Image (cartoon, coloured by chain):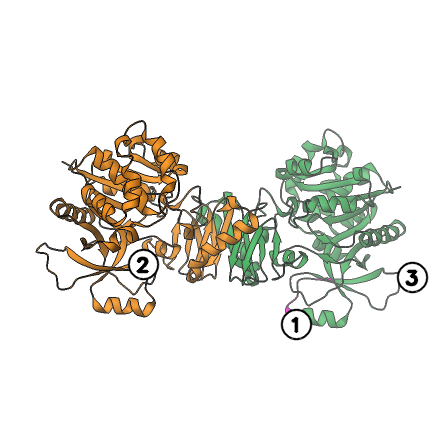
Chain colours: A orange, B green
Amino acid sequence: MKNKNYYAILMAGGVGSRFWPVSTQNFPKQFHDMLGTGDTLIQKTFNRLAKLIPEENIFILTNERYNDLVFEQLPSVTKRQVVLEPAMRNTAPCILYAALKIQKENEDALMIVAPSDHWIEDEDAFSENVKTAFDYCESHDALMTLGITPTFPNTGYGYIEYDKEQSLGEVDVKSVNQFREKPDYDTAKSFLKQGNFLWNAGIFMWSAVSVIAAFERNQPELFRLFNNGYAVYNTEFEDDFIKENYAKAENISIDYAVMEKSNNVYVIPATFDWNDLGTWGSLYDKLDKDDSQNAIVNSKVLVDNATGNMIRSKKDKIVVIDGLKDYIIVDKDEVLLIFPKTKEQDIKKVLQNVKANFGEEYG
Amino acid sequence: MKNKNYYAILMAGGVGSRFWPVSTQNFPKQFHDMLGTGDTLIQKTFNRLAKLIPEENIFILTNERYNDLVFEQLPSVTKRQVVLEPAMRNTAPCILYAALKIQKENEDALMIVAPSDHWIEDEDAFSENVKTAFDYCESHDALMTLGITPTFPNTGYGYIEYDKEQSLGEVDVKSVNQFREKPDYDTAKSFLKQGNFLWNAGIFMWSAVSVIAAFERNQPELFRLFNNGYAVYNTEFEDDFIKENYAKAENISIDYAVMEKSNNVYVIPATFDWNDLGTWGSLYDKLDKDDSQNAIVNSKVLVDNATGNMIRSKKDKIVVIDGLKDYIIVDKDEVLLIFPKTKEQDIKKVLQNVKANFGEEYG
């Protein structure tokens, strides 16, 4: 039933340091059951994609140190599906590398590139949107994104500005004018007022042919570096080639390397609810609440005069709280964090302080 | 060097439920290193008494369930020194029982009865005061207490009113008029103004002969119950007798059973700093503070805008706190408590709620 030309690349190399102390360098956010549902975020993302895409065509792009976590949490995945970056080089190099491998395996491949740690409410709507994009990419040389309709002037996301006028004949497919970096508050407000701005969720769809062509046009050096290995990809000689050459790649994002420079970029306004689960506060927003608006993961709580808190501990730990409002209370075996939700962006700084004072092992 | 007639009874059967979650029914306060010094409270108390009293004459009066904890924490103590209550019957029955055992062993015995979980700053001054009391008790039929000079109108302690006029010829020994239960605030203030009121610290000294005589006078029934076993005390038949009879004893305190009814009661105003370590707040008062007036036991903390807090965790746990003032933050493996210091008296209620909601095992 599933189209064998459909492929996915799950981006699973990030650390999510604003979710410290749960998310750490050795055990990042995407490998945790952040929502307390029984599934880790990467498991949820894999299962969501597997509704549309053959499981064996879902590739996991991650860092070598997370290799074991991937196989533990996604036991059906084989070695072929795990693409390891030997060095941290941002998103462009690893996407190009994976696209070339997939292209060599199937020259008709259509690919989605998606973060492994986001929350999507309506999985059928998601599949529908991706299917629409794939249909479009099959017949056009297109670089496609899913854009999220903004609900408030968020200054923490990049925005995609699409062309109000240009009608493409196809439903829901808009031509993109430009990508806009995280705006200040007034700019974000004007984006919402203008109406043709969407949040950039980092979800991309294209044919392998189109994205490789876009790299060749816009990043010729990077293209040559990885295209030189084309003959050895998916063979026993691939590892040696990658180990020797990967670190030579420029550290550059897919947005900057390709999307912002191309004029065949399109966006579909997503018809599903989305959350990047970027901070404890955004996780709080998506969780069920108790009568006092506390979001609780794993803990057994007894609260008095405590409202709006994000509470997480190991399974079934008793947490008694009196008088806290809008706090993040996260307890791990070696670390306890009690921090105001309004200052959640400072958790990265706290983490730096903890590492400086008590050792790198706590990050 | 030490006087072989000197004996001590360490009261170690209480639970200290206001120190939950650290203090629990199975592992009460006196067996914890509450001060973070490396010694538990009972170890500190034992060592303090051992400066004046032969170690083999220090008896531990406790509940059967704490038998193992006593031998673990006081390895020099033998079975002879541990007096177990087969049932909870308040202080009078167990003190009488222990006094009879000691009297049978040494009819010249002078005894101090002392809580196992209090804090005393100047241990030499304490020894000095006890020695003065023992000297007095050796030559008089006296029931003696150490009274603490009040520093503020505390409504949480009982008070001892001594006779301003009566001169006893001996330095520092005052005749007691009456014991006063925990007063309301205005009464406590008037006590301080009058100047002849001391806090009752639950520390008693007497000869075995005098206390047994006082029981015989004031609690004839209780006296008969335990005196009936005199022949078997310190023999292999003692256990059977106690198991059969102990539960028949009235549930009554030493204050009410004997002290308040006797007219040979004397008090020595203590010349040492004392704290009953009754609550997290009183523990906080006695601990060293960091620059922000936080008292920290075991934790490695990183605080910002957090002052006056009592923080305790397992050894070397990282605790990050932002914005809390005057809180008790206590973390255990299975329980986390975040509670205002001003409401510390409510911790008993919290404990009841936790047990009712999540099970008796958490108390």
Q: Residue furthest right?
A: B169
Q: Are marks 1 and 2 on the same chain?
A: no
Q: CA distance from mark 3 to mark 2?
A: 85 Å
- Vertical position of residue A286 compared to residue A32: above or below: below
Callout 1 secondary element: helix
Q: CA distance from mark 1 to mark 3?
A: 34 Å
Instruction: Give the residue at x 72% y 58%.
Output: B200
Q: Nearer the viewer, residue A153 or B150?
A: A153
- Residue identified by numbered label 3: B169
Callout 3 secondary element: loop
Of the numbered discs 1 and 3, the one sitting upstream in the chain is 3
Of all chains, the one bearing label 1 is B
- Residue identified by numbered label 1: B186
Q: Is residue A261 left or right of residue B253?
A: left
Look at the numbered discs 1 and 3 and tell me whether their residues touch, using CB distance below 8 Å.
no
* Part of the protein shown in magenta: B179-186
Q: Residue furthest left?
A: A169
- Vertical position of residue A339 compared to residue A55: above or below: below
